[in-house]
Image (tube, rainbow, N blue to C red):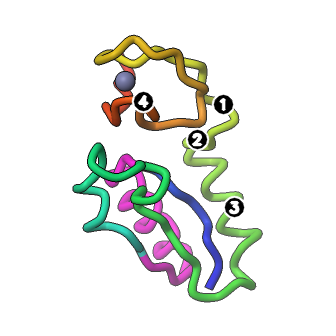
């Protein structure tokens, strides 16, 4: 098992899983239920994760993640809509209050 991707945006995880399975890459979602507790426990510990069942698929899978364009590297810094905390682009939720990022 190999961790491929982690995000609080569950729809991203589902979408990626679909893309991977279309390519014949088997994967599994973890922490799907835990994510509903976001805000009550640190989000870094409860973000949904996408795991590859076969590590040999890693290179192909990473290419798909890059194509999907949800890589943390490309995200701009943002400010929490709830508590105004400035945040790095790789976070999909506020570390301070747990509010989810808004892309508008
Ligand atoms: Zn906040």
- Tell me the number on the disc at residue 62: 3
Q: Mark 4 points at which residue?
A: 96
Give the mark nearest the N terminus, 3 or 2. Answer: 3
For ligand 1, give the image quadrant.
top left
Q: What element carries label 2?
A: loop
Q: What residue sits 51% from the left and 17% below the top? A: 78
Q: What element carries label 4?
A: loop
Task: Judge the density around disc 2: few (<14), some (14-19), many (≥20) Cα neighbours within 10 Å.
Answer: few
- Residue 22 highlighted magenta (yes or no): yes
The magenta stretch is: 8-28
Q: Is residue 25 above or below residue 7?
A: below
Separation of marks 4 and 1 at Cα, in angstroms: 22 Å
Give the mark nearest the N terminus, 1 or 3. Answer: 3
Q: What residue sits 39% from the left and 48% below the top? A: 8
Give the mark nearest the N terminus, 4 or 3. Answer: 3
Q: Is residue 33 above or below residue 83?
A: below
Q: Where is residue 70 in the image (x, y as percent from the top left)?
A: 55, 42
Give the image quarter of residue 57.
Answer: bottom right
Q: Disc 2 vs disc 1: Cβ atoms closer than 8 Å?
A: yes
Task: Judge the density around disc 3: few (<14), some (14-19), many (≥20) Cα neighbours within 10 Å.
Answer: some
Ligand 1 contact, mark 4 (Cβ < 8 Å): yes
Residue nearest the observer in this picture, 33 or 98: 98
- Mark 4, mark 1: which one is toward the viewer? 4
Left or right of 68? Residue 12 is: left
Residue nearest the observer in this picture, 80 or 50: 80
Separation of marks 2 and 1 at Cα, in angstroms: 8 Å
Q: Name the residue under label 1.
A: 74
- Mark 4, mark 2: which one is toward the viewer? 4
Give the mark nearest the N terminus, 4 or 2. Answer: 2
């Amino acid at each position: 098992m190999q961790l491929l991707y982690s995000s609080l945006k569950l729809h991203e995880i589902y979408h990626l899983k679909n893309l991977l399975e279309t390519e014949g890459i088997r994967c599994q979602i973890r922490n799907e239920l835990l994510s509903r507790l976001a805000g009550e426990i640190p989000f870094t510990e409860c973000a949904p994760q996408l795991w590859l069942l076969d590590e040999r698929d890693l290179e192909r899978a990473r290419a798909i993640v890059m194509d999907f364009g949800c890589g943390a590297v490309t995200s701009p810094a943002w400010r929490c809509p709830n508590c105004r905390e400035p945040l790095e682009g790789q976070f999909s939720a506020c570390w301070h209050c747990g509010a989810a990022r808004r892309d508008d």
